Amino acid sequence: MMRPLSLLLALALLGASVSPGSAQSSRGGWSLSVGAGPFRIDDLAGTPLVPTAQLLKSGQRAAFGVAATWVNNAGFYTLTALTLDVGIGIRSGQDRNEFVALVGPTGILGGDSDGTPYTSAGAHLTVGGTRWLTDRIGLTAGAVARVWFTTANSQFAPSASIGVRFRL
């Protein structure tokens, strides 16, 4: 866990020293974030630390995003699954700070080592913020609340992440 955190801090320091006043989140556009954080699956799979990526298109006040989370070998029965969140919502921010809230459908597809399928559809609410260090690189953090409609197991699956966002 220290290596990713060290990398994030190094990128933050590099970004701040390259261009201290150039970040302008008010312009929106396409961005890609990569990060990691805890994902509460259920009692058997637990709350593993998982990688996540999000592609976001933001305008002056609106945003559209697609996020994928990869769960690999989690829990006693080694769950492997992919979660996909698609959302539309609002964006706000000035200068170096950008905030987004998205709502939309979510799904998980996978299974564990004893053959139990982990497939479900539901809805999610995603909130997040980015602190732009330069015009192209920022630190980002977010949280997702998922409610599964088609599962007999855990009905609520929250997650959080911290990472780096790049303007495309």
Image: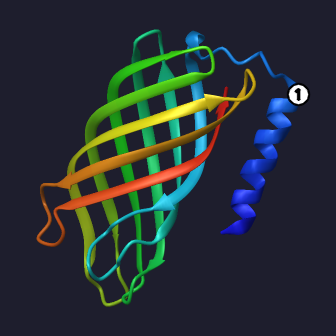
Q: Amino acid at mark 1?
A: Val
Q: Quadrant of residue 64?
A: top left
Chosen colour scheme: rainbow
Percent from the top left, x then y, of residue 66? 43, 38
- Tell me the element at label 1: helix
Q: Quadrant of residue 135?
A: top right
**Pick the front one: 122 or 133:** 133
Q: Is residue 20 left or right of residue 35?
A: right
- State the residue at coordinates (19%, 53%): 147
Q: Is residue 92 left or right of residue 10?
A: left
Q: Quadrant of the N terminus?
A: bottom right
Percent from the top left, x then y, of residue 162? 56, 49
Q: Residues within 10 Å of mark 1 (few under 14, many from 20)?
A: few
In this picture, is 92 found above or below 11? above
- State the residue at coordinates (49%, 23%): 57
- State the residue at coordinates (35%, 77%): 46
- State the residue at coordinates (31%, 90%): 114
Percent from the top left, x then y, of residue 167? 66, 26
Q: Is residue 166 left or right of residue 28?
A: right
